[in-house]
Amino acid sequence: MSSYPIAKAKEQLSRLIDEALAGETVTITRHGKPVVELRAFEVAPKQQSSAHLIDEIAARAKLRPWLGKSAVDLLREMRDEEL
């Protein structure tokens, strides 16, 4: 972990960012007291493709029991019951 006063950090910001990206934690101080900590942002894992998600949803749908009616028919029944 490295520590720099604000004035020095302003002059060397690009280098401090490179240090943080390399895994180093950089502390910026004001009047000798730590006020800011610089570290690399953790990147979220890559999201799955749409095609993969659609395949997963279709596979799950096949595992569900058949209700004897299509979704359209069930929705129509529910709509008609409310009238």
Image (cartoon, grey):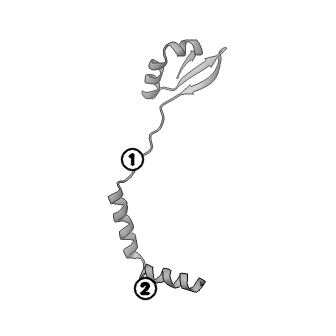
Question: Whole-percent x and y of residue 33?
Answer: 66, 19
Residue found at the very far front of the displayed protein? 83
Give the labeled residue for mark 1: 46
Three-letter amino acid code of the residue under disc 2: Lys
State which tag comes first along the sequence, 2 or 1: 1
Identified at 42% across, 87% down, the residue is 68
To which quarter of the image does residue 54 belong? bottom left
Residue sitting nearer the eye, 23 or 64: 64
Task: Tell me the number on the disc at residue 10.
Answer: none
Give the labeled residue for mark 2: 69
Instruction: Using residue 18 as the reference point, say whether residue 7 is left or right of it.
Output: right
Identified at 39% across, 75% down, the residue is 63
- Dot 2: few (<14), some (14–19), or many (≥20) neighbours within 10 Å? few
Question: Whole-percent x and y of residue 44?
Answer: 45, 44
Vertical arrangement, residue 80 with respect to residue 52, above or below: below
- Dot 1: few (<14), some (14–19), or many (≥20) neighbours within 10 Å? few
Circle 1 — which element? loop
Vertical arrangement, residue 19 with respect to residue 69, above or below: above
Three-letter amino acid code of the residue under disc 1: Lys
Circle 2 — which element? loop
